[in-house]
């Protein structure tokens, strides 16, 4: 009788605990949500599902389609018009200027002039 109670108590205790590593990976849920958001944005941007697939090759096609379909249904129910998406090339705001490395001859010449200037300063 006590054995049954102990086994029942252990089973109830184990049923309520969460074993680390047994729950689904949160990164998978995030990727699915991101892909659905991409699909929704494509539909709202009046982009075809094929274009959406080709622009987002790393995302799951099934999740992209699910998001696209959900947004399509939502837009039809609420009579929402899409906004044409445009992909344009943007020009950089600033021009980046890189300095060339000085040659060995330039480095030697500047080292000599620095030494001469230090010698003159010490003489005065």
Image (cartoon, grey):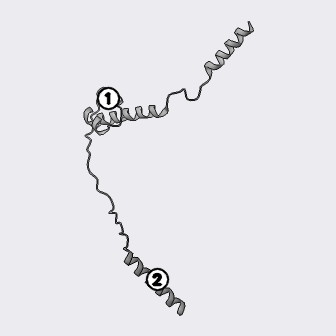
Image coordinates for residue 92, horizontal then vertical, percent: 31, 57
Q: Residue at x 38, y 78 (%)?
A: 106
Q: Residue at x 35, y 32 (%)?
A: 60
Q: Residue at x 70, y 8 (%)?
A: 4
Image coordinates for residue 47, horizontal then vertical, percent: 26, 36
Which of the pair 59/21 is nearer the observer? 21
Q: Tell me whether the residue at label 1 lies in contact with that at label 2, contact meaning CB atoms closer than 8 angstroms.
A: no
Task: Determine crowd level at label 2: few under 14, some 14-19, many 20+ residues with C-alpha closer than 10 A.
Answer: few
The disc at residue 65 is: 1
Residue 113 image-quadrant placement: bottom left
Which of the pair 62/107 is nearer the observer? 107
Above or below, 119 against 81 in this view is below
Above or below, 123 against 62 in this view is below
Q: Earlier in the sequence, mark 1 or mark 2?
A: 1
Which of the pair 49/124 is nearer the observer? 124
Q: Is residue 15 left or right of residue 113?
A: right
Task: Determine crowd level at label 1: few under 14, some 14-19, many 20+ residues with C-alpha closer than 10 A.
Answer: many
Q: Is residue 31 left or right of residue 39?
A: right
Q: Look at the numbered disc 2 and give the secondary structure of its residue.
A: helix
Q: Is residue 47 visible?
A: no
Q: Look at the numbered disc 1 and give the secondary structure of its residue.
A: helix
Q: Residue at x 25, y 33 (%)?
A: 50
Q: In the image as oriented, which residue stretches furthest toward the top?
A: 1
Q: In the image as oriented, which residue stretches furthest toward the bottom?
A: 124
The residue to which callout 2 is attached is 114
């Amino acid at each position: 009788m006590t054995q049954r109670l102990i086994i029942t108590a252990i089973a109830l205790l184990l049923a309520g605990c969460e074993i680390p590593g047994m729950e689904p990976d949160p990164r998978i849920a995030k990727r699915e949500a991101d892909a659905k958001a991409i699909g929704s944005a494509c539909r709202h941007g009046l982009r075809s599902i094929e274009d959406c697939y080709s622009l987002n090759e790393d995302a799951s096609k099934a999740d992209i389609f699910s998001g696209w379909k959900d947004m399509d249904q939502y837009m039809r129910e609420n009579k929402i018009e899409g906004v044409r998406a445009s992909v344009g090339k943007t020009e950089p705001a600033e021009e980046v200027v890189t300095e060339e490395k000085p040659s060995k001859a330039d480095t030697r010449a500047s080292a000599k002039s620095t030494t001469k200037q230090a010698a003159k300063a010490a003489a005065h």
